[in-house]
Image (spheres, grey):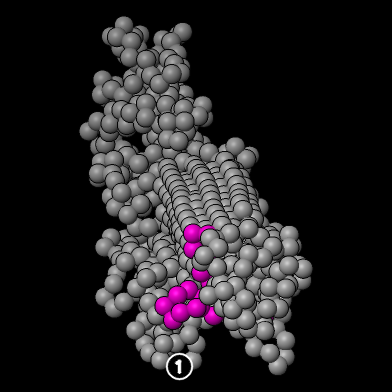
Amino acid sequence: MARSDVEEALSQAEERLVACARTGRAWSAVEGESNRIRSSVIRDLVSDIDEALRVVPLTPVNPKGLEIYGATVVADRPDAAALDLEGVRVCSKLWFDDCAFVQPAADGRADLPGVISIRDAHAKSLGFLGCSFQRIDARRSHIQGNLYLDRANCDECVDLHNAIVEGEMSCCGMLIGSDRAPGSDDAPAGPWSHTHGYALRAETSEIGGSVLLTSSDLRQFEARGKVSFVRSSIGGRLDCRGGTFRAARTVEGDKGRRIALHLDGVRVDASVMIGEGFKSSGEVNIVRAKVRSDVRCGGGTFRGGTGNDLRPSHNRGLLPWRLRSRDTPVPCVALNFQSAEIDEGLYLDDAASAERTMIDGALILSHAACELFCDGNANSRSEYIAGPPPGCLELDGFIYSRLGNCSTAWKSRVRWLQGQKTGHLVTSFRPQPWVQLINVLDKMGYKEDARFVSIKKQVELRKSDSLNPVQKLMNLFLGVTVGHGHKPFHALIISVFLLAPAYFVFSIAAQEGWMAPQNGEVLVSSEYWSQDDCQTPAGYRELNALYYVVDSYIPIIDQYHERDWGPSSVSAECAKQTNPSHWTQYLQVHHSAALSNSYEMFFRKRFENGWLEIIRWALIVSGWILVPLFLAGVTGTMKRFED
């Protein structure tokens, strides 16, 4: 076929397109003229393919590139792509606006959405703004400029697997995927079998600029299928604010994970923004991601699945610990940050967001790391903490240096920690989340809050299955006596309640003559027994009941009373000669002799049975236990051991 014959075969719209390519003017549809342009014509204008394969003679394209508005780009054959640039080098910028890419039906029916194929191609900037097509196949392509898909309609998938985009990738206001059930008569050909539920697939790709999956001024970004950037590199920010991400519907009986946004192993050199109107139905997976700036989720809605898919384990914040179920279903995951590395802040909620963050499903922060963690707004709602339902939180190994503008009150933080899943609280207690929070609060200057969180940590440990009965009893004892080292003055209060009745008993024993000198020479001396009231010789230390009780209780202070005096039946005969005690005289005068005798016989019977010696040894043992615990708590020794 001669070249003149080929030129005559061009339609009027295609001839205008060739002219526009030379002059640099944009092509746009004209009323009364067909707007259909063959795919091969566009390919021949912008590529450097062999002359023998051309439909259009080699035409120099203006440096401004080729811009097409309102065209219908048609595949050359029913089995060909609507725009076939596979394996070619695109030498100029290619820009489409409000165009439709169609594939003619073989049986003469209406045109079907066509495929845009730029697989293995090298291109400059590409734009498909407001266009409609079946899918884009850009696997292993290399785009030296920007890729714009704003306001586009894609029935199946945008596939950028292993592609390179040196500039920005913008999909603002784009609609990807279809609500039509797979296998139905009006469903696109092969969307589920060929794309495996993907809406946007950019795995192992390199994007030099930012990735914008946000809403535009005209409409919202929506992806009906998985959006995946697994092991990709993004040189700018990943912005998904205002976008809607829906995981692909699985076939009946499929119990696999439903992932709406998959960022496993992604590297982002700026921020990741998944808040401010962001909505997901399915897991948002940011596992092993490396983010050089912030991750902001404030104002986002994260649902692990549909309402029937979510099964929170139990309302742990309302149920007593004895009623906590140990065999509970695992809920669907809403947000997964496992092993993610965030150089700056992780904001589950912050003051910048107008709406509260809603997490309906499990939140996994295990082994993640960030500099600043913020899960609320301390200015307007101090008690509010963005988080999943009770029992749907994983925090083991989560490391952060400080808390942001969120609640630091110990009650709020304890409720947050108590929201962990049952296995990390009851079955196998994980102390790391508690220790991490205690250290952060302490370094930030919230000493009292850190102290109470540390005490609650021990309470939760005692309620778990990690301790045997003996360890639980010891844990309870340390909590009651010294608050696990954080309330050492509790030991002083207990000491007062121990010493007061002991002083009362020993003061009566001293008055009744049941306290004898411990010096053997005094006891056998005739001087001691010759006196009517069994008084000690001159120069011997007088008995003081208060000093005696304190001396017996405190092991490190020696008042010499315990060494000089003690309970003894040796003085029984002397006690009979002793004048009645003050309490006996008081009861005789103000009440009756019978009551006075009953009082005297009550104590005499018990003193004769060795009760004083039992009380004395109880004081000594209590002192050896409580006094060192008090000192360990005051000096911080026990606190350092616990934390």
| Residue topped by disc 1 | 109
Q: Residue at x 49, y 91 (%)?
A: 110
Quadrant that contains the C terminus: top left
Judged by its main secondary structure, the magenta piece is loop
Q: Is residue 83 magenta?
A: yes
Instruction: Tell me if residue 448 can be seen.
Output: no
Residue 102 position, x and y percent, is 52, 81
Residue type, label 1: Arg
Tell whether 8 sits left or right of 506.
Answer: right
The region drawn magenta spans 70-88
- Choose between 372 and 205: the one closer to the eye: 205
> Which residue is found at the position 40% from the left and 91% from the top?
107
Q: Is residue 387 above or below residue 279?
A: above
Residue 21: where, in percent of width, then height?
71, 69
Query: Where residue 58 sits in the image (x, y, percent)?
Result: 63, 64
Of the pair 490 and 419, the residue shown nearer to us: 419
Q: Residue furthest left?
A: 609
**Label 1: how many Cα within 10 Å (few below 14, some 14–19, many 20+):** few
Viewer-side residue, 329 vs 470: 329
Taking the magenta stretch, the answer to whether it contains residue 361 is no
Residue 10, located in which quarter of the rendered image?
Answer: bottom right
Say if 106 sits above or below 576 in the image.
Answer: below
Q: From this viewpoint, is residue 606 visible?
A: yes
Name the quadrant containing residue 506: top left
The residue located at (32%, 54%) in the rendering is: 423
- Where residue 562 appears, as percent x and y from the top left, is 38, 19
Answer left or right for 373 relative to 120. right
Q: Is residue 215 left or right of residue 539?
A: right
Taking the spot 24% from the left edge, 30% from the top edge, the residue there is 610
Q: Which of the two residues, 344 or 112, is positioned nearer the viewer here?
A: 112
Q: Is residue 30 above or below residue 396?
A: below
Local secondary structure at mark 1: loop
